[in-house]
Image: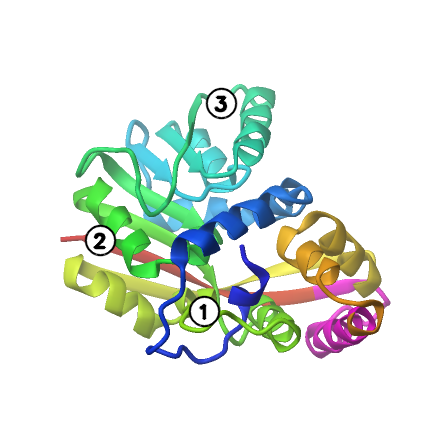
Amino acid sequence: MSISSLATSPVRDSAQPDLAALKTRQQGTWASGDYAVVGTTLQIVGEQLCESLDVRAGQKVLDVAAGNGNASLAAARRWCDVVSTDYVPALLGRGRERAAAEHLKIEFQEADAEALPFPDGGFDAVVSTFGVMFTPDQDQAAAEMVRVCRAGGKIGLANWTPDGFIGQVFKTIGKHLPPPAGVKSPALWGTRARIDEMFGPHASSIQAEPRHFVFRYRSPEHWLQVFKTYYGPLLKAFGALDPAAQATLTSDLMVQIDRYNRSGDGTMVVPSEYLEIVVTRR
């Protein structure tokens, strides 16, 4: 994900961002570091989403912008026929390793969330956990998820909210690296209004439930070191700043952690709000 497009600054509609160029930069960002180190800690979100979707054995499930496959693995554990997609081949490779270790049958395929290479109505459920929300062309990505989901099928999403911990981390990064003009914030996917706007015309129902994922690390400094090393957006952010600006960003992030940290013992126990969405396709 392009670092600067993670910020929650207002959109300037008059600007026309180069979405293709932005996507290329995003691809490089997510390929840097090793997102799988962070991604694997989020597994519980994929499990919860599959329960909320009430997926059934034998259903065809597509995981969009799957990363290292949290929702893919969760659906495969429920005996679904799963296709796991991402536009970063290395992340698909990490998903393959996880599936092989658990002897789970999953098909892995490189794919762009904005141009899914699948037929209309080909899946009973289409899911994404903290993935599709980072696409440059939000409306196109949403339209593709709708297109490949069958009538009566379900679209399941887990998206960070603007006011939760990760949403505020995005905002903090944006203070140091302002977003490109005209690019919608990924955190909009964590609002009911934006979900209704993108999916409402195609839905017979939309359920949206605020939930929390809890980041548990040895200390705030441990979290920052892991994210600076493995999480592409933060790795790239620090790489783009001079030492003085890096120190300021570090201080700002520590303030955010302190605001949310409930551990009381020096470790980091930080709940981060996300919106879990279940759209039933009309």
Q: Which residues are magenta?
A: 246-269
Q: Is residue 84 visible?
A: yes
The quarter of the image holding the N terminus is: bottom right
Magenta span: chief secondary structure: helix
Pointer 1 residue: 185
Q: State the separation of the CA atoms marked 2 and 3.
A: 27 Å
Residue 149 quadrant: top left
Image check: 87 left or right of 266? left
Residue type, mark 3 in image:
Leu
In the picture, measured across the screen, residue 242 lies left or right of residue 38, that is right
**In this picture, is 265 found above or below 42?**
below
Say few, some or many: other residues with alpha carbon within 10 Å of mark 3 (under 14 / 14 to 19 / 20 or more).
some
Could you tell me which residue is drawn at 52 percent across and 51 percent down? 26
- The image shows residue 211 at horizontal and vertical percentages of 49, 64
Question: Which residue: 41% across, 48% down?
Answer: 128
Q: Nearer the viewer, residue 261 or 32?
A: 32
Whether the magenta-drawn stretch holds residue 265 is answered as yes
Of badges 2 and 1, nearer the viewer stands 1
**Which quadrant of the figure has residue 227?**
bottom right
Taking the image as shown, residue 248 lies to the left or right of residue 28, namely right
Q: How much space separates mark 3 and mark 1, taking CA atoms? A: 35 Å
The mark found on residue 104 in the picture is 3
Q: Residues within 10 Å of mark 2 (few under 14, many from 20)?
A: many
Q: Quick one: SS at disc 2?
A: strand
Position in image of residue 152 (x %, y %): 16, 46
Judging by the rendered image, the residue that carries numbered circle 2 is 280
Task: Give the mark, 3 or 1, whose residue is nearer the N terminus.
Answer: 3
Dot 3: element: loop
Residue 212 on image: x %, y %: 54, 63
